[in-house]
């Protein structure tokens, strides 16, 4: 997982980041709300671990601004406040889960796995649907409305990855690793070419554009005109 950790206690942040990385994750750490907000807006993450009481901009305001900008990355709040009102405020602001301090690292890991599981859990679903797109993960058939899409293996894997994370940005690195495998030598431009080929089949003239480029971040499947 690629994780953004926003925690003003640098000793705690260093410990959590180091331990998460030992578990095979990639961690970016920020120590105040403004830095956390900028980083979350400029890079794609699988999940954000966010302290509530931060200097400059508190965690709840960071969440509100991220959600107002349509950034749907799952957010796990770390809070020393465990009253029902505090928890409700965090969830109402747009957090997906919370963990009270002090916490056991094993519990943090379990919460992170739980919050990033929805995408992985779809691996057992045969038919995926988004808007008027539908793919059969067993037969490798794909349709846009009533039109069958003749996709290559790589195009199908790319579309499937985007559909499993619909309306969320999928990083370039994750897409390349999914399509070509970890450690396989791939020219970065290969992904752009593959996206272009997929668009000619999925986003035909006259149809709503679904495959979006998020410059510097990756790609996403999203409806709308923006």
Image: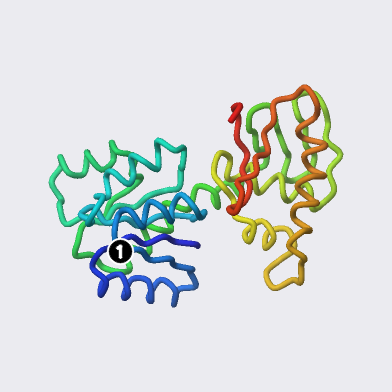
Task: Tell me which corner region of the image, top left, top right, bottom left or bottom right, holds residue 48.
Answer: bottom left
Residue at image coords 15%, 51%: 82
Query: Which quadrant is the C terminus positioned in?
Result: top right
Q: Is 14 in front, or is 183?
A: 14
Horizontally, residue 140 falls left or right of residue 44, namely: right
Q: How many marks?
A: 1
Horizontally, residue 31 falls left or right of residue 225, namely: left
Q: Is 118 in front, or is 77?
A: 77
Task: Tell me which corner region of the image, top left, top right, bottom left or bottom right, holds residue 30.
Answer: bottom left
Horizontally, residue 27 falls left or right of residue 62, namely: right
Q: Is 116 in front, or is 81?
A: 81
Tag 1's secondary structure? loop
Q: Is 113 in front, or is 125?
A: 113
Residue at image coords 40%, 43%: 66
Coordinates of residue 106 in the picture (x, y in percent) = 33, 68
Coordinates of residue 88 in the picture (x, y in percent) = 22, 39
**Mark 1 crowdedness (10 Å alpha carbons): few <14, some 14-19, many ≥20:** some
Q: Which residue is mark 1?
A: 31
As displayed, is residue 47 above or below residue 181? above
Residue at image coords 73%, 51%: 157
Coordinates of residue 33 in the picture (x, y in percent) = 30, 54
Coordinates of residue 28 in the picture (x, y in percent) = 43, 66
Residue at image coords 19%, 61%: 101
The colour scheme of the drawn protein is rainbow
């Amino acid at each position: 997982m690629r994780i953004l950790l926003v925690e003003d206690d640098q000793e705690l942040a260093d410990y959590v980041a180091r331990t998460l990385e030992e578990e095979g994750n990639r961690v970016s750490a920020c120590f105040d709300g403004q830095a956390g907000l900028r980083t979350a807006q400029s890079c794609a993450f699988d999940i954000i671990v966010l302290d509530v009481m931060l200097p400059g901009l508190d965690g709840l305001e960071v969440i509100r601004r991220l959600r107002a900008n349509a950034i749907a990355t799952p957010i796990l709040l770390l809070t020393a406040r465990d009253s029902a009102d505090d928890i409700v405020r965090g969830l109402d602001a747009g957090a997906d889960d919370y963990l009270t301090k002090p916490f056991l690292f094993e519990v943090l890991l379990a919460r992170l796995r739980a919050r990033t599981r929805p995408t992985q859990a779809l691996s057992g679903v045969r038919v995926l649907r988004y808007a008027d797109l539908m793919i059969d993960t067993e037969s490798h058939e794909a349709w846009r409305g009533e039109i069958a899409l003749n996709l290559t293996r790589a195009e199908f894997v790319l579309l499937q990855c985007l559909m499993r994370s619909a309306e969320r940005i999928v990083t370039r690195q994750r897409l390349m690793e999914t399509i070509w495998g970890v450690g396989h030598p791939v020219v970065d431009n290969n992904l752009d070419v593959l996206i272009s080929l997929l668009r000619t089949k999925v986003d035909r003239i006259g149809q709503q554009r679904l495959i979006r480029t998020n410059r510097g971040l990756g790609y996403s499947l999203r409806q709308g005109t923006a």
